[in-house]
Amino acid sequence: MASKNGKLALLGGEKAVTLQALDRWETMTEEMVQRVRQMVEKGDISTQGEKIAQEVEEGFAKFLGANYAVSQHNGTSTMWASYFALGVGPGDEVLHPDFTWICSFGPVVYLGARPVFCEIDPKTFLIDPADIERRITPRTKAISVVHWGGNVCDLDPIMEVANRHGIPVIEDCSHAHGASYDGKKVGTIGAIGGFSFQGVPGKGKPISGGECGMVATMDRRLYERVLLFGHVGRTDLMDKLQDPAHRRLAPYGLGLNFRANPLGLAIAQVQLARVREQNEKRWAYVQALNRGLEEIPGIDPLYIYPKAQPAGWYGGLQARYRPEDLGGLPRETYCKALQAEGIGVRPGAYSDAFGPVTGARHIPYHLVPPYSRGFDFYTHGRGPLWEGYEGYAPGDYPQTRQALARMLQLPVLTDPEAGAVEQLLEGFRKVAENYRALF
Amino acid sequence: MASKNGKLALLGGEKAVTLQALDRWETMTEEMVQRVRQMVEKGDISTQGEKIAQEVEEGFAKFLGANYAVSQHNGTSTMWASYFALGVGPGDEVLHPDFTWICSFGPVVYLGARPVFCEIDPKTFLIDPADIERRITPRTKAISVVHWGGNVCDLDPIMEVANRHGIPVIEDCSHAHGASYDGKKVGTIGAIGGFSFQGVPGKGKPISGGECGMVATMDRRLYERVLLFGHVGRTDLMDKLQDPAHRRLAPYGLGLNFRANPLGLAIAQVQLARVREQNEKRWAYVQALNRGLEEIPGIDPLYIYPKAQPAGWYGGLQARYRPEDLGGLPRETYCKALQAEGIGVRPGAYSDAFGPVTGARHIPYHLVPPYSRGFDFYTHGRGPLWEGYEGYAPGDYPQTRQALARMLQLPVLTDPEAGAVEQLLEGFRKVAENYRALF
């Protein structure tokens, strides 16, 4: 179908998108407001493992089909606890994609280990299974994979390599609550999984409670190590620990507190009750949009591995720009033209939203200080990124750099207004048909 | 003045305390409920350094007279960030009192360093300045002092030893918001200070926001290192960093997130506005109670160092039991008799409240696993408490063990009902005069 209105909005034409509100999905609901109000009135704002944490942990484990879940104060600490649970320590290496969000591997260094980056697959922006094996050394202690943006890593080849080398896989599922691979929910396929609950419902992580998160695992030993790591003084610790060596450490555990704030957990709990519905609605939207994009020059919809079922989504729906279809039109100009049509498309990664504030752009991690050149974390020439650390050169991950240069973020709608998808597609089509006017 | 009514309540007599509610101070206020409600309605529940964090940081720095304050997700992370800021790392030792709360030094191990315990002063239950110097080795990187229960450590001799050896002092002020020494607020006297804001207003820490905390310092370099450590992606990071080596690391910092939850900060902010008033009222109560206790056998009121002005308080007002005055009456029996009179006195430390749930009692840290015998933190025989770690023997800290055996926790009232202090003193007097009936 050809576009009806030829003049681009960027050049003074009418916008393709005329609907006022594209998405009807509620963000903060009255139920959340009332739950929080009641808790504050009762002074139920600090917890040592009591009711709300237990409830949300049980509900989330059930949702995933996981044996165990532990609430944490944020997504970073879910990954920290997961690395710790697996015994990552000084001298170890952890494989991690060269592009995601820095907190996913940040804690590795604070356990005395080094992150070792892997290329991403340009079709999915997820860790390239083919690149994992060549990065494995005798020091590799864990393989960290990130189901970035709600799309699911190709876990069959990843688990095959990991199992063959006897290296556990950590899944960062912070964008992918409810996503699955071969019928199993992510976070239950590798040894352990971390889920951020950061942000605002409907606009933040797939389950958002302000600042909190959840670890999931099928493995009792890892579960107990997560509890020991960050749940000092949790009053139900003794009920949960079975290993005598662990029980000996109660009630203090290992002297840290990564407890979630109960108000955040309450907001997350309200969302948990609707996350299946949210995921189904978003998937219907993603399918409809991607189907339409298949036929429009200038853009490739995100590739999904055959056994993967994406879910959750955060920061946008990724797609790949194809400047070769549009006479080499710069990606920034393409996005500006789409934005003028009323489509919230951004070049690059979600975290480029920091750009206007900080002047920084999302770049692959091998180029980010302190990983690129090393950093003296503990002063006096100490820490895993100092002595003998070689760092990285700009050309080390060509596949990742090329992939990021094509990345686009498209809006994710949960409950689109009637005709919304059609108007979005109309905008993409209009820009593709009239791009020459932008030169 | 002799007690009027001779028969102990434990033995069927009338209670000394007949007032229904001893304390009139409000805990959760309507202002807190409304602030939180408004924030949840607006979806203002997750932050990257914006308005609420900045406001509370500025307000708290002003309250202390500190140059800088940084909000953190809890008290543990304030200490973690403080140790990191000072460059504590692998191979280092950190001096810390053998009795406080485990999270105060727990993070030391996660920076690769070892805690080295010091005796406490039996008069105050605070680090014994005389014991510090003999524990210093070439590896000592910091001296951590805790103003436990709101009483203030004897900072003159501590700072003298520290300065002579060129070792920075960290103040854990988690119970002592607004306390001072020689006219200066604690948290601004050592190099850096950590404040927990954990718990429920009026019943928790002196400023309680559920789960959050604050670091304070006079030193710009330490301030910048705290920001780098745990404030990844904070959108005002670039405005706050001056050191070019630090600015190069923005906006990611060092890849960790220790951000406070905004709802907790809002609750804390309401309390901050009244903390001076709260401290003044509590101090009037403490003075009145302690003056009365001076004349009653069986108990010594808490000693306060000459330049110290206690404030805040948490978990109780400490006092020392003197069984020698009461024919060797066991401390537990003494407390039961007082409880029967209507006085909430407990033997031991505040954290013995875990006892009924976990079966554990508060013990000095040289007896707590993993510190007593070592622990293989990172598995495979690694971590600061494993290779070459000697641990401690039960007899290593006789002064601390003797002090803890006499510790009592008395109720802290903020706004006592008229006659409350008199009734409490009447109860202490009655038990002291009639203790023989308890044998």
Image (spheres, coloured by chain):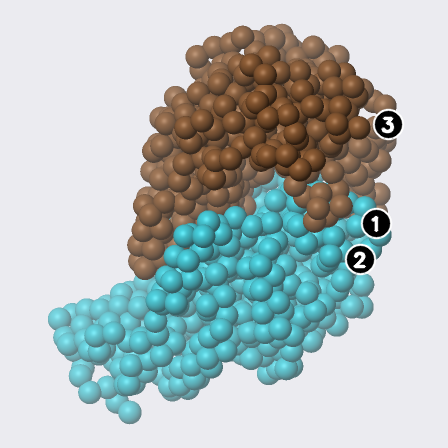
Chain colours: A cyan, B brown
Q: Which amino acid does label 2 sit on?
A: Gln
Q: Which amino acid does label 3 sit on?
A: Ala
Q: Can you give x and y, in whole percent of width and height, for residue B408 in the image?
A: 66, 27
Query: Label 2 to label 1, Cα distance in Å?
Result: 9 Å
Residue sticking out furthest to the left: A12
Neighbour class for label 1 at 10 Å: few (<14), some, many (≥20)? few
Q: Can you give x and y, in whole percent of width and height, for residue A23 in the image?
A: 31, 75
Check disc 2 and report the residue beneath it: A242
**Mark 2 and mark 3 residues within 8 Å of each other at the beta carbon:** no
Tag count in the figure?
3
Residue in the image at 50% along x and 66% along y: A269
For the N terminus of chain B, give its image quadrant: top right
Question: Residue A245: which numbered mark, if any?
Answer: 1
**Mark 3 and mark 1 residues within 8 Å of each other at the beta carbon:** no
- Whether B84 is drawn above or below B44: the answer is above
**Mark 2 and mark 1 residues within 8 Å of each other at the beta carbon:** no
Question: Relative to the observer, which residue lies in front, A62 or B435?
Answer: B435
Which element carries disc 1, helix, strand or loop?
Answer: helix
Check disc 3 and report the residue beneath it: B393
Side of B424 where B299 appears, left or right: right
Neighbour class for label 3 at 10 Å: few (<14), some, many (≥20)? few
Tags 2 and 3 on a common chain? no
Q: Can you give x and y, in whole percent of width and height, for residue A58 in the image?
A: 62, 67
Query: Label 2 to label 3, Cα distance in Å?
Result: 27 Å
